[in-house]
């Protein structure tokens, strides 16, 4: 494992910052990780992507995604939480990637531009569908002994392709990689021997797969579809 703990110094966060209103992370000073793959789950707005982004930036990644060599910026939207974070490292990863669904188009454009340089191999990501290019980006950049931050990777992927992504994550993990993943996908969350941290109920805490909203709501809908739809749509 490359990252064992994350420490947050709230004295470095401006008074009145919206960060202090995120219940799950406010006043949290330390979070420890126990597995090579850690999932962040929770309702929208619970702070999971905010923490993931801050960790990735603190590790040296571009806020919009890519490798540590990426230096482009199209819109400065990241929080200042990264300035208050310190990562406890066991060793430093030699390779890594920050992949986020919302800025993938910008990263794909930059990948194409960088690949046109000396020795580059153009990948033509924009000539593929969103899901195909997203998965190709993973398969071209994810290897063993790397450190990876993924923010809602399922957004571009069909259920079948989510299974492919799960396979790629497991392949890299077996070769020494570490992952931090924000996801709502019950498929990706099903990866064995991983740790799930939920941001719900106002505190970050471990959660079993079957206790996640992603699993429970999906299971409930699949098993009681007609009843749920009748009740929901009648209401």
Image (cartoon, grey):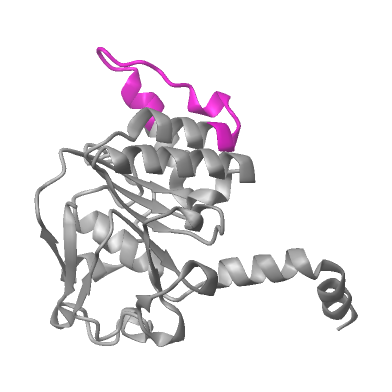
Residue at 47% of width from left, 74% of height from top? 45
| Residue 150 on image: x %, y % | 39, 51
Q: Is residue 183 above or below residue 116?
A: below
Q: Residue 95 sits in which quadrant?
A: top left
Q: Residue furthest top?
A: 119
Q: Is residue 61 left or right of residue 160?
A: left
- Work out whether residue 109 can be spotted: no
Can you say whether 211 is above or below 57 in the image? below
Which x, y percent locates residue 57?
Answer: 24, 55
- For the residue pair 27 and 164, the one nearer the viewer reads as 164
Residue range in magenta is: 111-132
Tell whether position 94 is magenta: no
**Front residue of this view, candidates 23 and 74:** 23
Can the viewer see residue 133?
Answer: yes
Q: Residue at x 60, y 32 (%)?
A: 129
Q: Say which quadrant the C terminus sits in.
A: bottom right
173, 41: nearer the viewer: 173
Horizontal side of residue 194 vs 201, given as left or right: left
Residue 173 to residue 39: above or below: above
- The residue furthest front is 193
Q: Quadrant of residue 151?
A: bottom left
Residue in view at x 39 percent, y 43 percent: 169
Total numbered badges shown on the rendered structure: 0
* Left or right of residue 12: residue 117: right
Residue pictured at 24% horizontal, 86% vertical: 27
Where is residue 128? Give x, y as percent: 57, 27
Tell me residue 204's x, y (percent). Answer: 35, 78
Whether residue 119 is in magenta: the answer is yes
């Amino acid at each position: 494992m490359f990252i064992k703990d994350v420490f947050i110094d709230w004295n470095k966060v401006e008074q009145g910052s919206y960060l202090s209103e995120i219940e799950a992370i406010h006043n949290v000073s330390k979070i420890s990780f126990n597995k090579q793959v850690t999932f962040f789950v929770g309702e929208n707005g619970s702070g999971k992507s905010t923490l993931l982004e801050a960790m990735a930036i603190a590790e040296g990644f571009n806020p919009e995604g890519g490798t540590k060599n990426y230096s482009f910026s199209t819109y400065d939207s990241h929080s200042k939480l990264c300035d208050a974070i310190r990562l406890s490292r066991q060793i430093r990863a030699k390779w890594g990637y920050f992949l986020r669904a919302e800025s993938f188009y910008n990263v794909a454009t930059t990948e194409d531009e960088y690949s046109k340089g000396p020795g580059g191999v153009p990948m033509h990501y924009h000539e593929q569908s969103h899901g195909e290019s997203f998965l190709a980006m993973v398969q071209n950049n994810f290897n063993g002994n790397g450190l990876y931050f993924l923010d809602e990777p399922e957004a571009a992927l069909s259920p079948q392709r989510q299974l492919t992504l799960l396979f790629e994550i497991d392949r890299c993990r077996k070769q020494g990689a570490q992952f931090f993943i924000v996801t709502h996908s019950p498929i990706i969350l099903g990866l064995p021997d991983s740790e799930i941290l939920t941001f719900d109920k106002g505190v970050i805490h471990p959660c079993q797969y079957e206790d996640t909203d992603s699993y429970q709501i999906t299971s409930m809908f699949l098993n009681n579809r007609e009843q749920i739809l009748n009740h929901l749509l009648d209401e």
